[in-house]
Amino acid sequence: MMSSSRLRRVRPHATLMLVLVFMSVAMTVGPALARTAEPPAVKVLTLDEAVALAVRNSPEIKAEQFAVLMRQSQRAQADAARFAQLDVTIVGGPSPRARGNQFDSPDSKNAVAVSGVFGLATFNIIQPIYAFGKVNNLRAAATHGTAVEEARVHQKATEVAMLVREAYYGYLLAVSLENLALEIGVQLGGPLKKVQRQLDAGVAGVDNVDLLKLRTFQGQLEKQMNDIRQGKALALAGLRTLTGLEPSLPIQLADTRLQPLERQAPPLDESLSDAQRLRPEFVQAREGIQAFERLLAAAEADYYPMLFVGLFGSLAEATNRSRLSNPFLSDPLMDDVLAPVVGMRWHFDLGVTAAKVDEVAAELGQVQQQHALAEQGIPFQVRQAYLELEQHQANITATRKAFRSGRQWLVAAVANFDLGVGEGKDVAEAALAYAQLHAAYFQAVYNYNLSLAKLDHRAGRDVAEVREHLPAAPQVR
């Protein structure tokens, strides 16, 4: 064993080594921990980027894309109906004994004695050559059906984009109203403190009415501020949900305030013409009518036969039989047959075909009425959006003038109050008028920006914008 003096000499060196090891580990791990603890970078979103993310990540759009895939599969089935069809049946089982030859045998069909096994394969290859237009009509119907589903994808994408615009402009509206409330709060702060000081000093002509009016308006302002901040948080949460961004990722909008868009709306006649060409609902109606017209023709083709050429055959082998060479005799368990044929297949179902034709005709009529409804309703929607746009544009002009006058009124009322020639109620009334008019201006800007987007949406012009952001087409295998 080491002596106690030897241990005392070793301990300082061991302590020094432990300190050095600890320092080296801290220097190595510390920066890594610091890097790990860094908060994620803020995601700055423009309106176009938000729309692109929402369209690309939307589960609703992806669900509609699977409907397109279903129609494409139906087209593939209709295409395949033009080609040859092969049916093969293979069976096996016990083979009754058959001794002798085709002229004489000690065995009988009535006294079965199993002494072997057999295998039998039957097949037929049928190549349709004419089906009275059924195949071609089914192919065309599937093509038009695919166009219908693609238009539904575009419709859903434009709806998602509109939701993004509502949330984006809604957030900017909340920010603008929040800044307005803070501005008015600052304007009220000075008069409130002055009234309180005058009351404490017992200044003549100052009573609690002025203070109570100012405090009442301040309370209303605080309540509005709470509502505004709740709406602001909700709009941001809606944007996060629509774009599919991670909950932990901070979001910041590229725009910092709400202001009217500078672009001008196209004339009403142009918007009406665009709606006829571009609106997804019109595309669905037009393509749907053509699809059901072809389906009706295909259903009516079931009244007629299908002509074909083909190859019929069978292969049979048994362990206890011999092949027969006499062409007038055949043994189904020991024979090979191959025959090219020309034929006709005709299915009679005692009224089922007629009922199917009536069903498709009814569906065609339903789609035709939907097209008529679109012809009536969509132009009205376009006109409504155009009139609302004009209204909100006029409201912007009117409220801009009004809130600027209201601001001058508030500044003058505060100045008069500071000089002692005005009352607290004058400040409260001016602040209330200014707040209402400025908030009305921001609301008019919000409505105007959304009306521009709504007019594009109802004219179908937003389809081109969202089409380039669509998710990749889904694959099922």
Image (tube, grey):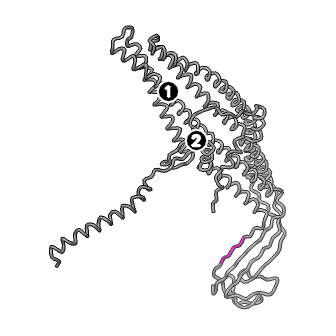
Identify the residue shown where x is 75% and y is 82%: 335
Identify the residue shown where x is 67% and y is 81%: 119
Location of residue 279 in the rendering, given as x and y in whole percent from the top left corner: 73, 40
**Mark 1 Cα shell of 10 Å, populated few (<14), some (14-19), many (≥20):** few
Q: CA distance from mark 1 to mark 2?
A: 23 Å
Q: Nearer the viewer, residue 70 or 4?
A: 4
SS at mark 2? loop
> Is 174 located above or below residue 63 in the figure?
above
> Is 55 located above or below residue 110 in the figure?
above
Residue 88 among magenta residues? yes
Q: Residue furthest top?
A: 205
Residue 456 lies left or right of residue 220; in this view the side is right
Location of residue 436 in the rendering, given as x and y in whole percent from the top left corner: 54, 22
Location of residue 124 in the rendering, given as x and y in whole percent from the top left corner: 76, 72
SS at mark 1? helix
Point out which mark residue 183 bears: 1
Pick whichever of labels 1 and 2 is earlier in the sequence.
1
Residue 375's quadrant in the figure?
top right
Amino acid carrying mark 2 in the image: Ala
Residue 362 appears in the picture as rendered: no
- Per the rendered image, the range of residues in magenta is 87-91
Residue 255 among magenta residues? no
